[in-house]
Structure formats: C-alpha cells, structure tokens
Image (cartoon, rainbow, N blue to C red):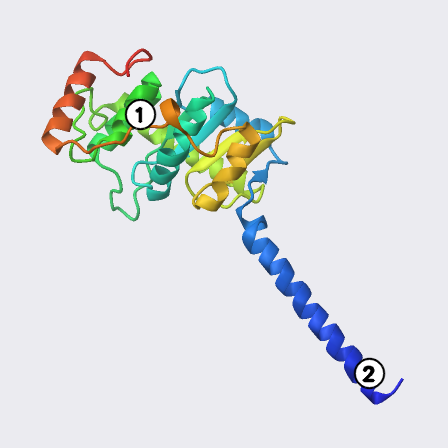
Amino acid sequence: MTRKHILYAILFLIVAAVLGITGYWLYWDNFVRWAPVTITQKQKDIQELLDSSGYAASGKEGPEIWVITYRNCATCKVWEDQELPKFEAIGADIRLVPFAPMDVEGKVTTTASERSTIAEIWLNRSYPLYKQWRAASEEAWQPTFRAADGDLARSAVVQASRDFIAKLEPLLGDNGVPIRYPLIIWRDGTQHIRVCACSDERMYHYVRDDLHAPSKLEGAQAPALKIEAPATAAAETVASDSATGNYGPDSR
C-alpha cells in the first residue's frame, strides 16, 4: 500500500467518524434527549409514595396519569393548558399533585394563599378546586377556607407536600430522570412506570402516544376560549365558591 493510499484511508476513517458522531448527536438531540424514562429501580417505593400523596383526582376510569406540579412553574402551566384537556377527553384518571417549593436560604418562595390552597387540596383532594386555582391569577385568588399559616395541622400538610418531593426526586434521580417540572408519571402498555420531565413541548407526544390521547382537540372536545376576568370579579367568584364549598366532584 502506497503512502497515498494510506492517507486516503486515514481521511476516509476521519470523515466516517465525523459523520457517525454527527449522526448520533442529531439522533440524540432530536429523539433520545426528549424521550421519557422507564423506571427500573424502586418501582414499589415510587408507587407507594404517589399513592400516599394528597392528589386531586379527576375520578375517571381511564388510564392513570400523575402530574407533579407547583404554582409558579411556567412550564407546568403550559403543559396543563395544552395537554390536560386531551387526557380529560379520553377519560384518563388524572391525579394532580401540587407541592409547595422549599424556602431558599430564608427567602419565602410561596404565598400565604398558595400554602393554604395546597393544604386544602391535599386534605380534600378536589380536582375542580385545583383547576379553579390554576385558572385564577395570584391577585384574584382570595380563598375563604381555613388558612394554613398559624394552623399546625394545615402547616404540617404543606410540609408534607415538600417532604413528598424530597423523597420522590432521589428515587427518580436514581433511575436517570432529570428533575424538571411538570413531572408526568404513568404506566405504559406493559405496565412499566414511565416518567416525562415535560419541560419542553417536544416531550409531550410521548405521553399522548403511550396513553392513546389525541394530538388535537376539535369541536365539542376543544376547550373554550378563556377570557381573563377582572381581578375583582374573579376574586368574588372564587370567594363565593370556596365559601359554599362549590368545588366538589359535582361542580363545574
């Protein structure tokens, strides 16, 4: 083999390596990095932790889907606005688990009304209450149920939501799940636990595909256009509903 042939062979190997690395990176960037994680360790611990949380359930009989979220999570709001109606449309057993983020170096990261609402949801597991809370702005949301601050029992429930996250994150981390919110947890057709850290819209279709939810809602299934009400009017509606307990399973 001549020197020229050797140089051609080296050049070919370099080009092939570059193309191979580039191809793998493109595949990883477009598919692998967005794919959900199948849980292979401590499945029982994860399921027991979910079952013991104060989730707000839709009460339907379809496939079970857990949504771990917190109030000021912008990516959670996007997922809930775009995807939640699609799972409601197939009658999924949706279980919403709101939690109160921990304070950071003495800085309070939640509001009094947020803590009170989380305690109320965890205690009464009201799906309609959660949706009313999510639909209202923080300024408009002035609930009249018992406050969590100054109430030892309800403050303990708020702390329980934080303890839930403190236990869940390491279990998911051990399985290679990146901790980003919302965390969507479900079981696929073979009953394996799957987790999507759904902070990017490119992840959404994996959950829909596994649970056979539509990619779009049309006609009667599509959510109505939501028009923001003035803060004062919304506050009056929320106060009225919470005062009469009008956020139970039969409310709309």
Answer few, some or many: residues within 10 Å of disc 1's Cα (few below 14, many 20 plus, some between 14 and 19): many
Question: N-terminal of the two: label 1 or label 2?
Answer: 2
**Which is closer to the viewer, label 1 or label 2?**
2
Q: Quarter of the image holding residue 216?
A: top left
Can residue 156 be spotted in the picture? Answer: no
Answer few, some or many: residues within 10 Å of disc 2's Cα (few below 14, many 20 plus, some between 14 and 19): few
Say what secondary structure mark 2 lies in: helix
Residue at x 40% of width, y 19% of height: 58
Residue that protrudes farthest toward the bottom in the picture: 3
Indicate left or right for 247 with 161 as reference. left
Residue type marked 2: Ile
Q: Which residue is mark 2?
A: 6
Tell me the distance, in whole angstroms, between the alpha carbons under discs 1 and 2: 69 Å
Residue at x 20% of width, y 20% of height: 146
Q: Is residue 158 above or below residue 107?
A: above
Q: Is residue 23 above or below residue 67?
A: below
Q: Which residue is mark 1?
A: 130
Indicate left or right for 224 with 5 as reference. left
Indicate left or right for 159 with 32 as reference. left
Image spot of residue 236 (x, y percent): 12, 23
Image spot of residue 93 (x, y percent): 46, 20
Image spot of residue 76 (x, y percent): 37, 39
Observer-nearest residue: 67 or 209? 209
Split into 4 quadrants, where in the image is the N terminus? bottom right
Observer-nearest residue: 128 or 46? 128
Image spot of residue 227 (x, y percent): 21, 32
Residue at x 25% of width, y 46% of height: 107
Say what secondary structure mark 1 lies in: helix
